[in-house]
């Protein structure tokens, strides 16, 4: 081949190489665009995908206490919706989100022996979503114990001698658990404590009479509490009381007079007739538990239905001071004996004017202290013999001693 022909062939080959290079793309194996992965001037691999949001639900499973809150938490994102539904009733449990919506907590107790469906959804900041479902089943008590109050919650005003009484409608095997769930707060604060009279009844009183003007808040937080023997608290209850002026009557069997004290100052002196020798009035501090302007007194209510000790009559301005038939009331038939002789069946008799005055000034929780009656001490169980128990013995009656 001549030199001129060699030059033509060489030029054609170079042009082909240049043409081929100009038409190549980054998809061609072994070649890449500048700055892409795999080139000398590249920036390395791309950023990893963000983790998906995670949802945790507690508690879960069976035999859950109904007072345990349902808590839903989101990690790596925020909650979008949470529902907790009673599967039998279709009602939804109320709850609240945290400020950043990373958690939700139920704000009301669950029911006993119930199943709840928990449905939650959450999302990351870039929109990736996650859903989570769970089931919560609460415990099934063998029985529930309802705590009733004396005085009833409808009563708001009481005297300085008023004990707080909680009566359960089931036997309480775990008195410690029950007592821990009963809270009394007094303002001003006064030393006080609980005393168990039976498996169902517990009383609270201060060491000495309440101070006049005291506010008392009682909370029976027994719902969800295991009270022993398969019995759980039926419901929480509250009682709010205000102590009015101190009214204390001092009835003396020797003098056959009763002196009335308001806030420590004697304001009246009344002639009285207390129980005769066969039916003496109980000794000690009595607390007014009821008052009726007209009341039928019947000895048959405490088992004496016939014989010389039996009676049935309508009395006026009657205030009960024990459950075995002792009242302060008007008795016109004993006016001649009032101030000199004790002739009643155990009550404190007054004339009409004094009985009406006493009725208008004394009410629930006010105190009648009986001395020199010749009778036995008022029993602690006899609504209310609470003040007959010494403070050390009262403290010993607590389950938390």
Image: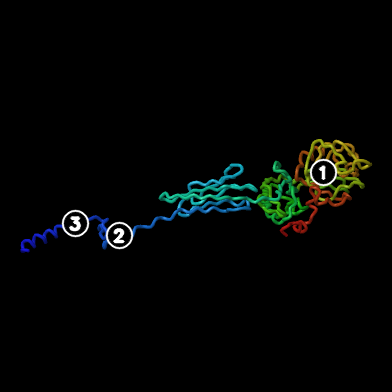
Residue 276 position (above or below residue 34): above
Asked if the residue under mark 3 is in contact with the one under mark 1, i.e. CB atoms within 8 Å, the reply is no
- Neighbour tally class for label 1: few under 14, some 14-19, many 20 plus, Cα within 10 Å: some
Chosen colour scheme: rainbow
Which of the two labelled residues, at mark 1 and mark 3, occupies the earlier sequence position? 3
> On the rendered structure, is 33 left or right of 195?
left
Mark 1 vs mark 2: in front: 2
State which quadrant residue 259 falls in.
top right
Q: Nearer the viewer, residue 222 or 382?
A: 222
Residue 360 at x, y = what percent? 77, 38
Per the rendering, the mark at residue 20 is 3
Residue 167 at x, y = what percent? 74, 48
Q: Which residue is mark 1?
A: 269
Give SS at disc 1: strand
Give SS at disc 2: loop
Q: Which residue is mark 2?
A: 37
Give SS at disc 3: helix
Compute the Cα span from label 3 to label 2: 23 Å
Q: Quadrant where the N terminus lies?
A: bottom left
Whether residue 366 is visible here, answered yes or no, is yes
Which of the two labelled residues, at mark 1 and mark 2, occupies the earlier sequence position? 2
Residue 395 at x, y = what percent? 75, 57
Residue 115 at x, y = what percent? 61, 47
Q: Nearer the viewer, residue 384 or 90?
A: 90
Q: Quadrant where the C terminus lies?
A: bottom right
- Neighbour tally class for label 2: few under 14, some 14-19, many 20 plus, Cα within 10 Å: some
Which of the two labelled residues, at mark 3 and mark 2, occupies the earlier sequence position? 3
Compute the Cα span from label 1 to label 3: 129 Å
Q: Residue furthest front?
A: 1
């Amino acid at each position: 081949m001549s030199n001129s022909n060699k030059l033509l062939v060489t030029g054609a080959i170079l042009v082909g190489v240049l043409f081929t290079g100009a038409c190549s793309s980054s998809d061609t194996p072994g070649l890449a665009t500048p700055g892409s992965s795999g080139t000398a001037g590249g920036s390395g691999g791309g950023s990893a995908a963000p983790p998906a949001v995670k949802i945790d639900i507690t508690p879960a499973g069976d035999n859950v206490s109904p007072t345990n809150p349902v808590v839903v938490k989101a990690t790596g994102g925020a909650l979008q919706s949470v529902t907790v539904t009673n599967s039998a009733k279709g009602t939804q449990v109320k709850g609240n989100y945290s400020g950043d919506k990373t958690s939700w907590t139920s704000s009301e107790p669950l029911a006993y022996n119930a199943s709840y469906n928990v449905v939650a959804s959450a999302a990351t900041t870039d929109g990736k979503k996650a859903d989570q479902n769970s089931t919560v089943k609460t415990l099934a008590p063998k029985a529930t114990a309802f705590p009733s109050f004396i005085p009833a919650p409808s009563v708001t005003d009481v005297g300085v001698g008023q004990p707080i009484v909680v009566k359960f409608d089931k036997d309480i095997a775990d008195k410690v658990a029950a007592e821990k769930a009963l809270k009394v707060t007094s303002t001003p604060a006064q030393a006080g404590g609980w005393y168990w009279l039976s498996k169902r009844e517990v009383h609270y009183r201060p060491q000495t009479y309440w101070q006049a003007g005291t506010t008392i808040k009682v909370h029976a937080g027994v719902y969800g509490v295991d009270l022993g023997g398969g019995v759980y608290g039926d419901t929480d209850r509250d009682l709010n009381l205000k102590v009015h002026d101190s009214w204390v009557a001092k009835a003396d069997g020797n003098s056959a007079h009763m002196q009335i004290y308001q806030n420590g100052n004697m304001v009246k002196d009344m002639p009285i007739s207390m129980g005769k020798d066969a039916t003496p009035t109980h000794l000690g501090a009595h607390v007014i538990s009821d008052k009726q302007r007209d009341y039928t007194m019947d000895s048959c209510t405490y088992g004496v239905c016939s014989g010389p000790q039996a009676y049935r009559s309508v009395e006026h301005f009657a205030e009960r001071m024990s459950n075995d038939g002792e009242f302060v009331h008007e008795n016109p038939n004993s006016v001649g004996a009032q101030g000199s002789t004790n002739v009643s069946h155990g009550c404190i008799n007054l004339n009409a004017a004094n009985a009406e005055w006493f009725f208008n000034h004394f009410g629930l929780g006010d105190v009648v202290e009986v001395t020199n009656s010749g009778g036995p001490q008022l029993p602690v169980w006899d609504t209310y013999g609470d003040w007959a128990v010494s403070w050390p013995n009262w403290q010993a009656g607590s389950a938390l001693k």
